[in-house]
Image (cartoon, rainbow, N blue to C red):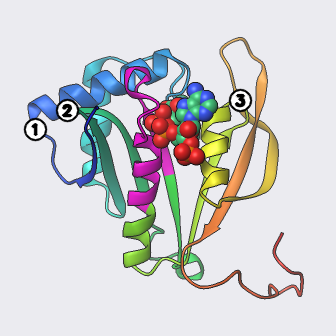
């Protein structure tokens, strides 16, 4: 049976960077590359991941299958000026390379991000996903994410067509909050 592992990573060795770029590249080719529609050069991907490691408030998690990096996810924390959303973080840029799918890595990555967020005291996590990503939608809904809205013009594809996107939240600490300041219960 394949060996799976997930960890937050603060620095990437040359080999790890190469594996992560390869994994990203193949996920983009397969149509699920967190924004990228066509794979950029490895040089651009390397700059991107070096940036992710440097930016305050971002954490990079990687998933390994048999020791090789095959996917990742990121945790975004609010900026310090955003006091009103200090308890709210974002799970983003989650993907698993096609060759490594179906081994539970996406679930493990999601749970690892949630666990870190919870440990840091974040009460709420948000994410969004293209409506065409059926597997991701099923994964998040099975993990208890609440679909609160759909943006009809979420992303534009190379052929010029628009696809909707779903927006989710999950309470990480405590119960679903009571009425909002407007007096309405959350959806
Ligand atoms: C969505 C994605 C991350 C899933 O990765 P994965 O490692 O194969 O997922 P897992 O093995 O952890 O499986 C997650 C769940 O989906 C189910 N699943 C996996 N592959 C499936 C498939 N082809 N069809 C239906 N269900 C599937 C699993 O049974 C599992 O269900 P469970 O959590 O109830 O046990 C991966 O397909 C991907 O990168 N897709 C493109 C990018 C994307 O959609 N990213 C997420 C939003 S940004």
Residue at mark 3 to residue at mark 2: CA–CA distance: 29 Å
Q: Tell me the tag on residue 132.
A: 3
Residue pictured at 38% horizontal, 59% vertical? 112
Tell me the residue that label 1 is attached to.
Answer: 13
Direction from residue 127 to residue 86 in the image, left or right: left
Q: Which residues are magenta?
A: 92-113
Direction from residue 10 to residue 88 in the image, left or right: right
Q: Secondary structure at mark 1?
A: loop
Tell me the residue that label 2 is attached to.
Answer: 17
Q: Residues within 10 Å of mark 1 (few under 14, many from 20)?
A: few
Q: Residues within 10 Å of mark 3 (few under 14, many from 20)?
A: few
Give the mark toward the camera: 1 or 3. Answer: 3
Taking depth in this image into account, of 132 and 78 the one nearest to the observer is 132
Q: Secondary structure at mark 2?
A: helix
Q: Confirm if mark 1 falls within 8 A of ligand 1.
A: no
Q: Secondary structure at mark 3?
A: loop
Taking depth in this image into account, of 81 and 26 the one nearest to the observer is 26
């Amino acid at each position: 049976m394949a060996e799976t592992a997930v960890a937050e990573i603060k620095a990437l060795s040359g080999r790890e960077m190469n594996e992560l770029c390869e994994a990203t590249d193949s996920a983009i080719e397969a149509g699920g590359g967190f924004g990228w529609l066509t794979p950029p050069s490895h040089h651009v991907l390397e700059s991107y991941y070096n940036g992710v490691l440097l930016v305050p408030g971002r954490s990079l998690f990687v998933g390994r299958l048999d020791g090789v990096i095959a996917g990742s996810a990121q945790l975004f924390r609010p900026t310090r000026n955003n006091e009103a959303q200090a308890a709210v973080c974002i799970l983003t840029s989650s993907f698993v390379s096609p060759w490594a799918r179906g081994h539970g890595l996406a679930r493990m990555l999601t749970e690892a991000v949630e666990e870190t967020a919870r440990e840091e005291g974040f009460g709420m996590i948000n994410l969004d996903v293209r409506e065409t990503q059926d597997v991701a939608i099923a994964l998040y809904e099975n993990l208890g994410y609440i679909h609160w809205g759909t943006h009809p013009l979420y992303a534009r594809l190379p052929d010029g067509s628009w696809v909707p996107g779903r927006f989710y939240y999950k309470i990480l600490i405590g119960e679903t909050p009571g009425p909002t300041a407007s007096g309405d219960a959350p959806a």
